[in-house]
Amino acid sequence: MSEADEIKAAQDAIAAGAKEQALPILWKLFVSKDCGTRLDAGLLLLVALDPLTQNEQLLQVADATSELASAMRKNDVRAYLLGKKAEFLYRELGNLTYRQRNLNLAAGIFQWIGFSLEADKEEFAAITAERSKLKKEIVSLEADAFAAIRASEDHYMRGHLFMSLAEISFSRFMDDQLEFSIGGKLKSKIANLYFLRRWHLSQFISFTGGIRSKLREAQSNSIAYLLKAIEEFAAGHYNSDVAHVLYTLATKFTFTYRFRKAQRYLNRARQLAEAENVRDVSNRIPELQKRIDDKCRHLRNYVEESGLDLPRALCGGRA
């Protein structure tokens, strides 16, 4: 089988929802002697890898593929890859924020000694420095994405850049919630009651007025960028990509408990995915429909799935 046929086979597997089947093919092609094949394999790996458990690999692939696109003078592709890198960096930032919050929790429980272990104190300082570094890099990449949008007339590339900006804004919304929530264990338990989350009342318990405004801005920006992505893809007649964005909008509205809007966009995504035979969207719709019907009463445990951990002092002192 030629490399072009293998790329096609990997694409078909991804489209059918069999990403694990595509990965061995793509990793092999990612070290091909042909630059075009390596570039295609890198771009497909960014779709096939699991962002929840393989974010580090996604960052490595994004960096290597960006260097290759630059060497091949494919500036639009490089701009797209920088936007994707910013998305992956925000996931890394979110993991660090979670870890840092848990170290604060440990310090709060063991108030008579500050941080429960010297190792936790050192880790807290290291995480603070790393988070600051990541934030600066994300802002720089975000600015590059805006510059690329202004410079490009390619609807396909502009659509994907707006999608990256949307993911960055939504990641900012999520990370800021974790970083700036206030109150102790009791207040957190109250704020996490389903009724309060369902009707957006928990934010009045967990955040100051200024942070609530910041969260609304990040959330609104994310939705606005996705709507712009739809405009770009529609202008270029990239209907399968429109279906992906409609599905993404439905997920954002579901996650933020706006179920009527979520259902509206999911219906549009379903209709377009069926008309255009966009299998990877169609395959994911039933699961999202269940979450909308359930009104997010039973959320996935993303922390456990990500393999994130508590501080040593809260885990029986394990290393």
Image (tube, rainbow, N blue to C red):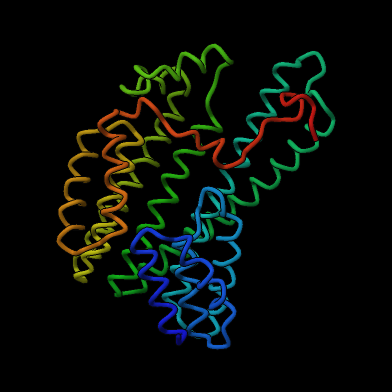
Residue 283 percent coordinates (x, y): 30, 52
The quarter of the rendered structure image containing the N terminus is: bottom left
In this picture, is 224 found above or below 76? above
Residue 57 percent coordinates (x, y): 59, 60
The quarter of the rendered structure image containing the C terminus is: top right
| Residue 116 image-quadrant placement | top right
Left or right, 309 with respect to 259, comes to right
Residue 86 percent coordinates (x, y): 51, 57
Residue at 42% x, 71% y: name it: 10
- Give the total of numbered labels: 0
Residue 251 percent coordinates (x, y): 32, 43
- The residue lying furthest to the right in this view is 118
Residue at 45% x, 78% y: name it: 75
In this picture, is 139 found above or below 12? above
In this picture, is 45 found above or below 230? below
Residue at 24% x, 33% y: name it: 259
- The residue lying furthest to the front in this view is 1
In this picture, is 91 found above or below 164? above
Residue at 77% x, 24% y: name it: 316
| Residue 105 image-quadrant placement | top right
| Residue 140 image-quadrant placement | bottom right
The one nearer the camera, 205 or 32, is: 32
Left or right, 182 with respect to 130, comes to left
